[in-house]
Amino acid sequence: MSNPAWQADELFVGLPLSSFRIAGSSNPKSKRTVGVSLKLYFSLTQTKTYIQSCLPLSTHALSQPLPVDLFIIPDLLSLPSAQSLLSNTPIALGAPDCFWEDEGAFTGAVSPRNLKELGVSIVELGHAERRRLFHETDETVALKAKAVVRNDMTPLVCIGEKHRGSVEEAIAEVKPQVESILAVVGDSEVIFAYEPVWAIGQPEPADSGYVVGV
């Protein structure tokens, strides 16, 4: 997208949603989803300015022949101000992570129940950085996904293979990631965001034919 408002660190695009959004979606081929994760790059003030610059996009998205669902995932500390800015817009508010319990003696953890109360509707889970830096596994990501749907939010689960190989090898690595989530979300909606881990941050992205093949 050429609009500079969306030139942030990570852009999620689902075209069509049948490859990303499954389970409880009433008509998965009738929508597109476009969203952005700001990770930990912006200050609180920069995040507010960025979100304000994105607001005009909501009108443009609604005017498209094929509806477009938009979401923004700021850092956790920016969620209250982001919710205030997005509350009367069609842009959904997302969170970059959560814990798998709603409450308890879990110092530093983020309650999915509290995220829901704050107005969050999408929670990003299982990003390659969290798997690498915080040693998250398919099992812990599935626990978080279960907590997200329990609190009536949509998990956005990042999936992808670590090593470059054939399409068949990629499918073999990604399939368990998908199955572990589907086993716990039931009929609830889930969005899968696929990107080969080996291509993240590289000068050249993965070939489109390869991505479609996976």
Image: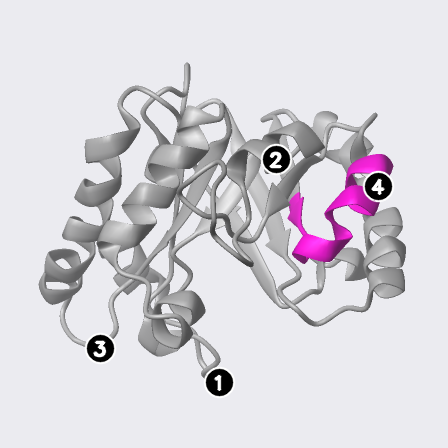
- Front position among marks 4 and 1: 4
Residue at the spot of label 3: 163
Rendered position, 154 above or below 9? above
Q: Is 142 in front, or is 165? A: 142
Is residue 84 located in the magenta-colored stretch of the structure? yes
Q: Hey, which quadrant is residue 206 in on the image?
A: bottom left
Rendered position, 132 above or below 192? below
Q: Along the polypeptide, which appears first: circle 4 or circle 3?
A: 4
Residue at the spot of label 2: 114
- Give the magenta part as a residue range: 72-85
Residue at the spot of label 1: 203
Q: In this view, does 188 lie to the left or right of 162?
A: right
Residue at the spot of label 4: 55
Which structural element holds mark 4?
Answer: loop
Q: Where is residue 166 in the image (x, y as percent from the top left)?
A: 13, 70
Residue at x-position 40% and y-position 35%? 147
Whether the residues at callouts 3 and 1 have beta carbons within 8 Å, the answer is no
| Count of marks overlaid on the render | 4
In the rendered structure, which amino acid carries the disc numbered 3? His
Q: Along the polypeptide, which appears first: circle 3 or circle 1?
A: 3
